[in-house]
Amino acid sequence: MYPQATQEIYDRRKELAPHTHEAFEAFSRAAFAEGALPEKTKQLIAVAVAHTTQCPYCIRSHTRLARRKGASAEEIMEAVWVAAEMRAGGAYAHSTLALDELAK
C-alpha cells in the first residue's frame, strides 16, 4: 500500500528542499535528544503518537529506535495501547458535539 522508504526517496526529498530538509532533521535531533525525558521515553511517546497518526513509516522507525534505546516489547505494546485508548477517548469526548446538535 505504501512505497518502501528508500535512500533514493530520502535523497530526492533533500535535493528538492535542502534547507527545509536540514532544518527538519536538526529539529528531529533536538526533539529526541536526552533531556528532561530520557531518549527511551521519547521513543515510546513517538511509538504511541505514530499509532495515533497512523503513519506506517513512523511506526516502524520509532519502534526500531525504541528497541535500540532499551524499550522492551511489553513497554512498546503498552505505548500502543495508550495510543488506542487516547484515540478512542477522543471519539468519546467529541460525542458532546453530536449530543449538542441533537439537543437543538
Image (cartoon, rainbow, N blue to C red):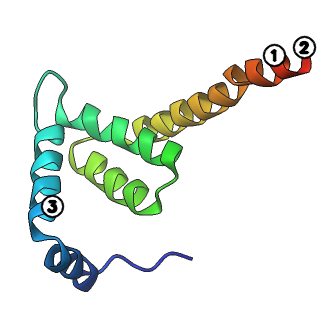
Disc 1 target residue: 100
Can see residue 73? no
Packing grade of label 3 (10 A; few <14, some 14-19, many >=20) is few
Mark 2 surroundings: few (<14), some (14-19) or many (≥20) residues within 10 A: few
Q: Sequence order check: which comes first, mark 2 or mark 3? A: 3
Residue type at the position of mark 1: Asp
Q: Are marks 2 and 3 in contact (CB under 8 Å)?
A: no
- In the image, what residue occupies the spot 57% across and 77% down? 1
Asked if one can make out residue 47 in the rendered structure from this viewpoint, the answer is yes
Residue designated by label 3: 20
Of residues 50 and 22, the one drawn nearer to the viewer in this rendering: 22
- 2 vs 3, front mark: 2
Is the residue 17 above or below the residue 90 in the image? Answer: below
Residue 28 numbered tag: none
Question: In 3D space, how far apart are the residues under numbered discs 2 and 1 (Cα atoms)?
Answer: 5 Å
Extreme residue toward the bottom, this view: 8
Q: Inspect the image, locate mark 3, and give the three-letter code of the amino acid beneath it.
A: Thr
Label 1 CA crowd tier, 10 Å (few <14, some 14–19, many 20+): few
Circle 1 — which element?
Answer: helix
68 lies left or right of 55: left
Residue at mark 1 to residue at mark 3: CA–CA distance:
43 Å
Instruction: Determine the residue positioned at 11% across, 54% down.
Output: 23
Residue at horizontal 75 percent and vertical 18 percent from the top: 96
The answer to whether residue 58 is left or right of residue 92 is left
